[in-house]
Image (cartoon, rainbow, N blue to C red):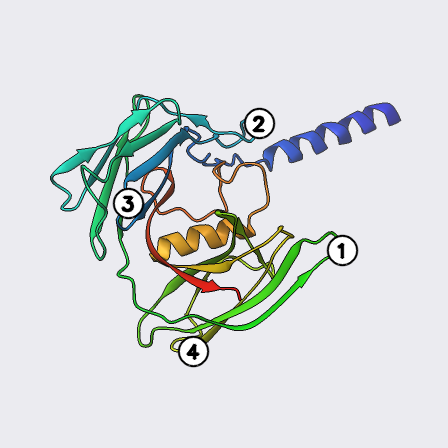
Amino acid sequence: MKTLFRLLLISIGITIFTSCEKEITVDIPDNNSKIVISCHLGVGDSISAKVSASIPLYELSTGENKPITNATIKISTDNSNWMTLDYESNQQIYFLSKNVHTILAGTTYFLSVSAPGYTTITSEVTTPVYQPISPIISKIDTSTNEFGNFQVDVRFKFTDVLNQTNYYGAKAFIKANGLLYELNNYNEKSWVFSDKLSDGKEFILNFSTSTVSSSDSIMLRVFQTSESFYQFHYSLFNYSGESPFSEATPVYSNITNGLGIFSGYDYREYTFPLQ
């Protein structure tokens, strides 16, 4: 009798449990591989781009994206008349010489990339117009170590262009024996920055170098960039992982129907002799 009663309770419990179950429908994100592009338009330069396929969500990966070698990459200044980039297999890049078209300042460029089996991607960017600045060296310490190698710590400063949104990048180099040696960003901050909270104010840039045998000058390269250039490099600086373009990606992208970056920049180089 007790056995029968226990079986009855178990049966009732199973009935109640199963009757309370609700079917839940979950939308799975688009898991198709997408076109990934990296293309930075330098004012006065040729055009080059790298194209690959994204790593789909939930797919095991080695952290490397697969290059797409049969894409059609088109660039236009009016979204109507297009120039097509050629593929160079030795470098695995798509290229258009500045002899065909030189990137112009203050110009909006449109991008279209298609490839068999992939959705066509698009983007656009307006290249910056470089605004004159006057960087100076505000502090410099040089020394020679026990091995006779030259070392330098240098601080640059310049004043931001007032009443407009500006995006910058800065790299510094030692010139020695006809070669350039890049200096380290002293504060280990991203090499790109904006004037969002510093309009018209002074920027301080600190750099230091590994040892070199000698040096005759220091060169500061200042970039003025599109917002997309800044956003991409800033997010890339803060990214830690194997592949920045696996899905979902934490790295900034301004590509419609795909992933990657389409941006613009211009730069000037300022040389300071060492005496």
- Residue nearest the observer in this picture, 9 or 75: 75
Work out whether residue 207 can be spotted: yes
Q: Residue at x 55, y 31 (%)?
A: 63
Q: In this view, does 132 lie above or below 46?
A: below
Foreground: disc 3 or disc 2: 3
Q: Is residue 154 above or below residue 244?
A: below
Percent x, y of residue 84? 21, 31
Name which residue type carries label 3.
Asp
Name which residue type carries label 1.
Glu
Foreground: disc 1 or disc 4: 1
Percent x, y of residue 114? 27, 29
- Residue nearest the observer in this picture, 210 or 255: 210
Q: Which mark is residue 45?
A: 3
Separation of marks 4 and 3 at Cα, in angstroms: 30 Å
Residue 9, located in which quarter of the rendered image? top right
Q: Which of marks 4 and 3 is nearer the N terminus?
A: 3
Residue 166, located in which quarter of the rendered image? bottom left
Q: Name the residue under label 2.
A: 62
Q: Name the residue under label 1.
A: 146
Separation of marks 2 and 1 at Cα, in angstroms: 44 Å
Q: In this view, does 69 lie above or below 199?
A: above
Percent x, y of residue 82? 15, 36
- Residue nearest the observer in this picture, 203 or 77: 203
